[in-house]
Image (cartoon, coloured by chain):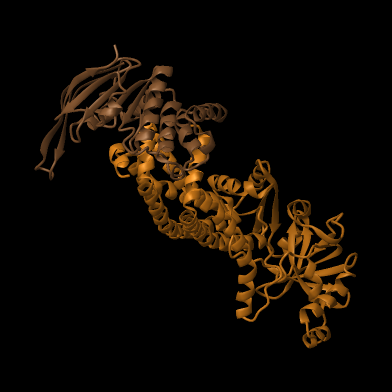
Amino acid sequence: MILISELNHTFKIGKKGQEKDIPVLRNVNLDVAKGEIVAILGKSGSGKSTLLNLLAGFMTPESGSIQVNGEELVGKTETEKANFRLQNYGFIFQSFQLMPGLTAFENIELPLKLQGVGKQQRMIRVKELLQQVGLTDVSDHYPNELSGGQQQRVSIARALIGRPSILLADEPTGSLDSETEQEILQLIQLLNHHYGITFVIITHDEEVARTAHRQYRMHDGAIQEEMHYVS
Amino acid sequence: MLAKDQREFISQHMKRNKLRVFMTILAAAMGCAFLIILASVGFGLHKTIQDEVLSNRIVTEIELAGKEGADERVTPEEVDAIRKMEHVKTVVERVMVPGSATVKLGEKEGYGELVYTDLAAEQLANLALDSGKMPASSEEVIVGYQFANSFLTEEQYKEIEAADDYLAKETELAQAIRDKLVGQTITVDVVDYETNEVRATQTYTISGIAKKPGRDWYYDQKIYADTSKSSEVLAAFDIEAPDRSITVHATDFQYVEDLTNSLKDQGFYVYSVTEELGEMNMLFTAIQIGLVIVGTVAVLIASIGIFNTMTMAVTERTREIGIMKAIGAPPSLIQRLFLLESTLIGLIGTVIAVAVSYALSFVVNIVVPIIVFGSINEEAPTDMTITVSYIPWQLVLIAAVISVGVAVLSGWRPARKATSIDVIQALKEF
């Protein structure tokens, strides 16, 4: 499903002409199977977010290969990467990243609009998903009228609406209280179990990482597998 | 993204910034309206002068002054060939006599301008009758509408001078003479210009009176006699080859230019109203282009507003653009959405501008002539229409293309900026 090989990336800092190279990823290799939940743990600055950004196609690595569903991501154009994300990925962000001017319904509907799905079909799918994440009553609420947990549910529903095979989650419970965190983690497990969706979760929280089938830890740009919970 | 969803997306964004979008549309509309109104003055004055030129002339007429060659004369064979040309209605040949005509009508004495012509061709060309009928023989003539005026007596002239409205009085008295003209016999003395001697005398019966000329100031005092009657007068003057005035009449105004050019190519010396219009049109086209350029400056100033609005929109929506790109919106879609928004602003502005311009043009055409004639203490001539502002569809099209084009260009850079927004930076900002 996901095969990352020999991935290297460097950030350039400093004034032009006096730039300094800071290596953030060093020979990262990662293999994620279909239907797996993989957690990538690490402290701030360990390179875990950079890895996710490269996997999402938001950045281009210095060297190495990223294969997703048999397709090489490195070398694709911006348009190709955008289309790839639309068809294969769903995103869950720590700060939810909902469109403030759109209602919960419209936020969830957005990826379907981008895919060019007709209005009738969109209505059916969004309503179905709102019911699954328990947000039917607040479908016409704007993000600022929702609680943190509700916003993250909207964000998860938006990530799922396009029926992606992979969900990339960056600190999905980082902005939530412990009770809501548990609800979201249960929802992730349920979706994984029910739909066989592959999850790559970036977190610094050991509790969140325990939801995963496998854990990787990152330190100074290097990655290493730590635990394997599920056989 | 479906086109309908794109439209919905744009209108949602525009509604969220109603005031700013409204002000931008207003600026775009003002710029475009300024362009249209300014240029419409050029078109209006052009139309006024063109109408004046056309109304003073028989627009389907082409004057034939001669032909390249030794004696520069047009032969009867050549006239026949012209008559057979496509879109030629008729050719009128008038024989010129080097003398004036003194006319006796019973006891009264007057004068007229003797014209020997082919009356059938004249009728086909333009000659219409006010009363009476066309001559049945060469002994009969048609006289011009104001031919009667030359028989007003000295007493009558004194009466006219004493009247408050002397023009109306003259018309009234001349009408009394005119009413009795048809059927009367006139004796025409052809007097030599140089020696003042009577060279020939002819007698005719008036069979009809020509229609009143379109212009009040033009007095038609012609005596239209048949060409065959000219030989005796020409013999008296010892003229073998008289001067002739030849006019070619086209079937429609639209063929005049082509016919004029075709005759020119054949070596004829020609003159038609299109010659005059051609030079005038060129001058006015230059003025109109100048006015459109000046007006475009106003549109360009308005474009700064559109540029600002769109740049602000991109800056404000950095996060939203980041989210859209993250979940899979291609750069081309982001660019299209912003370009469509600026195009829509330009388009709405243009529609408002066109409506306002037509309304303003209507008002200006009523008010300005009143002010102008008021300021020079004169009444507007009843037979003259002054068009101060005229908006042809071509002007609307040009203004719309410039206005929308400038709006698209103003939105181009902000739209490009939107596509280059870095997803990671955009999502980090909030």
Q: Colour of chain B?
A: orange
Which image quarter: residue B378? bottom right
The relative height of residue A37 versus residue B151 in the rendered view (above or below) is: above
Choose between B364 and A151: the one closer to the eye: A151
Quick check: can you spot residue A170?
A: yes
The relative height of residue B115 versus residue A75 in the rendered view (above or below) is: below
Quick check: can you spot residue B70?
A: no
Q: Position of residue B355 (x, y in %)?
A: 59, 56
Q: Is residue B176 left or right of residue A25?
A: right
How many labels sit on residues?
0
Figure quadrant of the C terminus of chain B: top left
The single residue placed furthest to the front in the displayed view is A179
Q: Position of residue B383 (x, y in %)?
A: 70, 68
Q: In the rendered image, what is the letter of the chain coloured brown?
A: A
Which image quarter: residue A17? top left
Q: Position of residue A62 (x, y in %)?
A: 18, 28
The relative height of residue A227 versus residue B292 in the rendered view (above or below) is: above
The relative height of residue A69 versus residue A141 in the rendered view (above or below) is: above
Q: Position of residue A90 (x, y in %)?
A: 38, 27
Which image quarter: residue A208? top left
Q: Is residue B60 left or right of residue B263?
A: right
Q: Is residue A147 left or right of residue B276?
A: left
Q: Is residue B207 left or right of residue A198?
A: right
Choose between B295 and B273: the one closer to the eye: B295
